[in-house]
Amino acid sequence: VNLHDANGVPAFTSDFEVAPFCDLWLRQQNADHFLDQQLAAAYQSVLTGVKWLNYRDSPCLRAMLERSAYGRLSIRMNLLGYDRTPGAPDYSTGIVVGTIGIAEQNEPRHFVRGRQLTAALTQGANVPPFIPLNQIGNIQAVCHTSNTVVSADFGNALPTTDSIGTLQDIGPLAFGILKDANVIQGASINADEIEILGTIPYLNPGWFLTTGGVQDFRLNAGARNLIQNHPVAVVKAEQNGTYTVMNRETAGGVFVRADNFVFRLNPGDEAHVHFHATRYGHPLATAISAMPVTGLMGGPGTGAKLPDIPVPDVNTPLGIVKFPTEFPTDANGRATVTISASDKGPGNPRHYLDGQVYGIGYQLKHLPPNYNSAPFNFVSVLAWDRYDIPAHPTWYEHIQPILSQYANLYPIMSRRLVKLNNYVSVISNLPIVKLTMLLPIENPNSMPVTRDMSAAKRQTVLKWLNTSDPATG
């Protein structure tokens, strides 16, 4: 990720630390076309290895450099409007709107440890998934240490009307502090029941694209006292002088999140999950419970009807991925938990794909009433099957069965570069195939992407590629 000025002069260069998406929701709720991508999500991570180049003329960039810890910056990208309509001018492209800021030394890398406004979802048999009850998605806010300003990020929280990010008019919105901590989302309150910090000018032309949806609110003396132990909220002003609570901070101000929450484990591997618990943005020493879940992972692994191959549910067989079912956070609200994969592997329950997917749900052990849990707050684990590396791998017996799957998944590669299921094509492109297979999985040029291989299968392919004469295979 590089930042340039209007003339193409680079201010800094950096590497994006790989991160999964979060806060998926149905942002464009009224689609004009069947292929409109109505879902939106956010990616939050850090930029590492930042090299500052031409920044001295910018007070903002100079301040960021002074505050940055260990050559890192923070980045959040809100993605929306991906066009899936063949023939459209913007086919296979979408909108990215986001922010880059400082990264403190001890803060999480993939979410904001602050004030969390978590929306309740609309319920019903015929209701599409991921629709917030009052049309506003999840919001993160931070009350700065000066206690005079609170910053809120609405970048992935307001509904859109089209694929270019036009925000939907849902009425006059304001940000404030609820004086009664027990008021629930969707309630109607009087003007004297909330301390309004300011309006949200989301309908102003260019507001979203120029601010990324981030806004500061100044706190007066009364608000500074109130915000310490009362929930912040987004409200809509009604014509009769009342307000409707569109979204609010979690009940009791309590929240827990796993910083890193997607893992790929080879048989016998371990991984460490870092949890952060807070109350009204401050560290919380508490207990966390964990349990196997399927939830929004979707249950079955595919909808395909394959002869003689039953569709397995995720999380089966049990006992392959192990983790503690309860653990405490320390005085800083932190806990690190080890998850492990059985050295025997899941036994290829999906047949057509390597390994199995496992979900680990987690939540504070003791929750207050009317608590809205974030539906995507779970740890996702891909546990690969056990695979014994052959002493002398050959094309037909070992390599083609592995690479054919990727040829099917990425047909564009077969048309433009190399046919991975074709022996002659692979041999003809041996140097580039070997190069991409040797790159670490974090590298954007690593192959294969998304459906990445287990370590044993990757080593098998590389062993075959490194034979003195792979053509004999």
Image (cartoon, grey):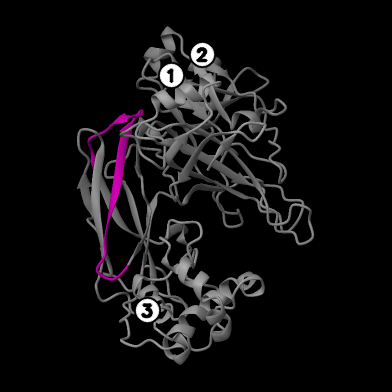
Question: Which is nearer the N-term, disc 1 or disc 3?
Answer: 1
The image quadrant of residue 262 is bottom left
Residue 97 image position (x, y, % from top left): 60, 39
Q: Which amino acid does label 2 sit on?
A: Asp
Residue 147 image position (x, y, % from top left): 39, 15
Do the residues under discs 2 and 1 have CB atoms within 8 angstroms? yes
Q: Which residue is drawn at 25% across and 70% down?
A: 342
Magenta stretch: give its range.
266-287
Label 1 or label 3, whichever lies nearer to me, is: 3
Residue at label 2?
192
| Nearer to us in this view, 232 or 466 | 466
Q: Does the magenta stretch include residue 451?
A: no
Q: In this view, does 165 lie above or below 189?
A: below
Compute the Cα span from label 1 to label 3: 66 Å
SS class of the residue under badge 3?
A: helix
Residue at label 3?
463
Residue at label 1?
179
